[in-house]
Amino acid sequence: MDIGITLDSTEILRKCIAILGIRGSGKSNTAKVLSEELNKEGIPLVIIDPDGEYSIDADVIDNFSLDESIPTERVLKEGKSVILDMNDWSEESFKFLLRFLNSLWLNSKIYKRNFFILLEEAHEFIQQGERNQLSDTIVRIALRGRKRGIGMIIVSQRSAKVNKDVLTQSEIYFLHKVVHPVDLKVYKEIIPWKSKDVENEVKKLETGEALFYFNGEVKKIRIRKFEEKINGEGQEVLI
Ligand SMILES: Nc1ncnc2c1ncn2[C@@H]1O[C@H](COP(=O)(O)OP(=O)(O)OP(=O)(O)O)[C@@H](O)[C@H]1O
């Protein structure tokens, strides 16, 4: 797949991928390009989208009284991507998310289809030092999903606030620009470079650029720009 650099999708399946950076550094663009390419290769995604901003080809859930077995089957049986539009951050949307993730977890054992769960604003769901039923479920899937075909893509502007276990277990990182010392500290723990070099390189990153860390190698890359589709083209709302 081509995201600005060439990636072999078979190498990233079932892995945990972290996309980090400040507001406007290009994280969502990276996540969208990656999702679009995975989708094209027939690898479905479950996108948890707090801002309703993903315009990739997928079924959309915005009705939280929906039976969770419907989107579960769409993903695991039919290989279709699903976007959960958390737009209003309502209690119902969180309850639905928990039911849906549990259903995906249980059924992934049966279907064993490779798919990804993409978590935008991950620090809101799996905050370091805070636990609840939903965060426990997400952390379990991130840490133990591999055997069931599940990969996780976590996107966050608050690197230091994301659950450390998940972050350190990630195997692939897209590290966009950060400026705050606590976030830089996280980058320094991830990248096997001298602290000063990390700081200098990260400072220079422009929108859309990232340090890509995979298989022990760090590369500065530029991700291509995602072409937004107009008005829900290719999307169908699940009822
Ligand atoms: N690789 C890129 N090439 C060209 N433009 C880009 C690229 N990445 C991002 N941009 C542009 O920069 C702006 C910010 O990008 P994006 O929304 O992805 O940032 P972000 O880090 O996710 O910010 P936020 O946290 O506010 O969502 C957008 O207008 C986007 O189109």
Image (cartoon, rainbow, N blue to C red):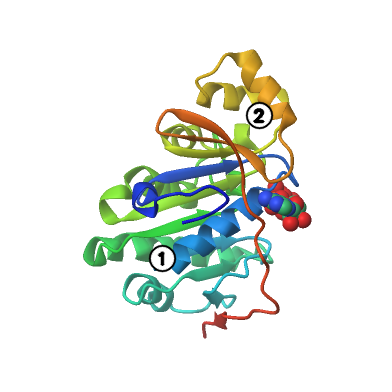
For the image shown, how many numbered marks are present on the structure?
2
| Above or below, comparing residue 183 to residue 100 in the picture | above
- At a point 66% along the width and 39% down the height, the residue shown is 21
Q: Which residue is mark 1?
A: 41
Please indicate whether residue 221 sits to the left or right of residue 78 in the image. right
Q: Amino acid at mark 2?
A: Asp
Please indicate whether residue 50 sits to the left or right of residue 151 in the image. right
Which disc, if any, is residue 186? none
Question: Crowding near pointer 1: few (<14 within 10 Å), some, many (20+)?
Answer: few
Question: Crowding near pointer 2: few (<14 within 10 Å), some, many (20+)?
Answer: some
Q: Amino acid at mark 1?
A: Glu
Q: Is residue 64 visible?
A: no
* Residue 192 in picture, x, y percent from top left: 50, 20
- At a point 46% along the width and 70% down the height, the residue shown is 81
Which disc, if any, is residue 183? 2
- At a point 41% along the width and 79% down the height, the residue shown is 70
Comparing 56 with 129, the one in front is 56
Comparing 89 with 237, the one in front is 237
